[in-house]
Amino acid sequence: MGQVRRDAIINTVITYSGVGLGYLNKGLLFPILLLPEQVGLANVVMLIVGFFGQLSNLGTGMILMRFLPFMRGRDEGYSGILLFAIGLLLGGIGLVSLLLLIFNQPILGYFSDRSPLLIDYSFWIIPLGVSSAFFSLFEHYLRAISKNLVAVMLQDLVLRIAVFLSLIIFYMGWFTFDQFIIIFLSLHFIPGLLLFLYLIWLKRFYVSFSYLNIRKRLRTYMISYGLVVYFNSFGRNVILMADTLMLSAIAGLKEVGVFTTMVFLSNALFVPYVSLIRISAPLVPQYWKKRELKALASIYRKVSSTGYFVTFFLFSVVWFNIDLALSYLPKAYADGKAIFLLLMIGRMFDALGGLNGDILLTSKKYRIEIWLTLPLLFLVFILNSLLIPDFGGVGAAFVTCLIYAMYNLMRLSINLFYFRLWPFDNAFLKMFTLSIVMFFAGVLSLKMIDHYVLKLLLGILMPVIFFAFPVYLFRWVPDISLFMDQALAKLKKA
């Protein structure tokens, strides 16, 4: 896992550079410079755009990830699998665009009462959705050929620098809000365009029909696999986006502004896990292809333990200082504390699951994913309909947390039952137990301290001394301990 660890570290450094800007953008400047309903507008439009991209992809990203290892080599254009995927994607874009145009009025009518601002910018959805769909396709293709970093840099760094500059200019009074939102939306075309140019520069943009050499039987299987993954991905994305969309329709864009800001803060703490998954996931189909179940079991354990360790450590540092973090935001964001807690509990269930979804989706039992998704799809709409009217964003966050927990527990059980793969060992259980004890002890201890500076210092030091240091010392997460050994060795040489 050495290469995975190195790539994940570089990936994380790039992403966290963007997260710093992202925090300035969505964590501070958006709430300070814009009204909560304006924050909600910007976030909901981009959420719908992302949903359009997911809805139109027909599983092409996972087709590339799953089947590229089986294609002929680079000199033969990987049998033209990129051209095949682009053809499927264009068909999906055409179908979704047509449906959106046909059902335009009833869809927009759902949001008209509580979120009228959304109607004024709805025409951006299709062109931005097309850009989002192609960016996702190119990103998956690059991941499949082990070129991970540029897509991360464009999405997490370049785009956020551009958004930051537009916010500064808006603050200086050079733009009205309407002009700012147009510039903000236009900037989201940049990553897809630059990723396309990067592929051409790499000479990996194999779209000539002369490369297309996929056997009919395999092509049929790829389409079948893609559609199963697509419908499962569609359901999963509906589940993950339902909270924000239903909030905007039931509670309004002001509530969405608070909720999506907390979503951003929770996502920022999830960056190392996402980086680890981006690097590790392409290895899963290779292990299946070679039937290397021991290697698959090993990376499954390592990703879960490393992902949970980093996610919990960052969460505990932020939670111990959450009141300070929220004090910089307008009073409208005071309810964000409970929302953030629930979202992060759900995220930690995701970190515990690690590669469980990638293992299942690239196995012969991939169709089971649909039967996991369908009941949760109904459950998320029912629970949000019941809880959002009374509890607003807190109700939506509770539903999200519950769905994350159920999804990952079911996947863990299925991987254990069918493949005898289980990501937890005794060392992990010791780390997990320590994390729970340290967290509650820290919460109780900090409640008894009123001194501002002392509370801040203890909130940072307690997770380091009573969680991270024992985990490193007893080597409960080997990759973390090895990384720390290497870092300390370099410091001694410096």
Image: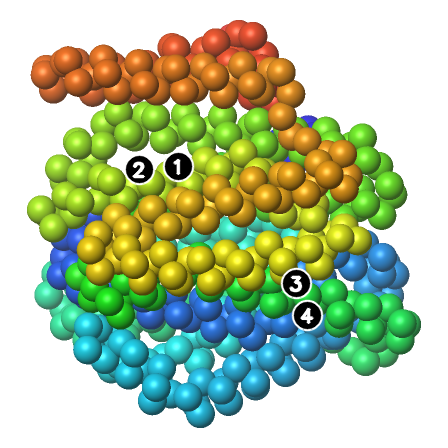
Mark 1 is surrounded, within 10 Å at the Cα level, by few (under 14), some (14 to 19) or many (20 or more) other residues, namely many
N-terminal of the two: label 4 or label 1? 4
Q: Residue at x 71, y 36 (%)?
A: 416
Q: Say what amino acid the circle numbered 3 marks.
A: Val
Residue under circle 2?
A: 341
Residue under circle 3?
A: 229
> How far is disc 2 from disc 1 in space, using C-alphas?
6 Å
Q: Is residue 141 visible?
A: no
In this rendered view, identify the residue nearer to me: 469 or 393. 393
The N terminus lies in which quarter of the figure?
Answer: top right
Q: Say what amino acid the circle numbered 1 marks.
A: Ile
**Callouts 2 and 1 close, C-beta under 8 Å:** yes
Mark 4 is surrounded, within 10 Å at the Cα level, by few (under 14), some (14 to 19) or many (20 or more) other residues, namely some
**Callouts 3 and 4 close, C-beta under 8 Å:** yes
Identify the disc placed on residue 345: 1
Where 149 falls versus 126 (above or below)?
A: above
Identify the disc placed on residue 227: 4
Element assignment for label 4: helix
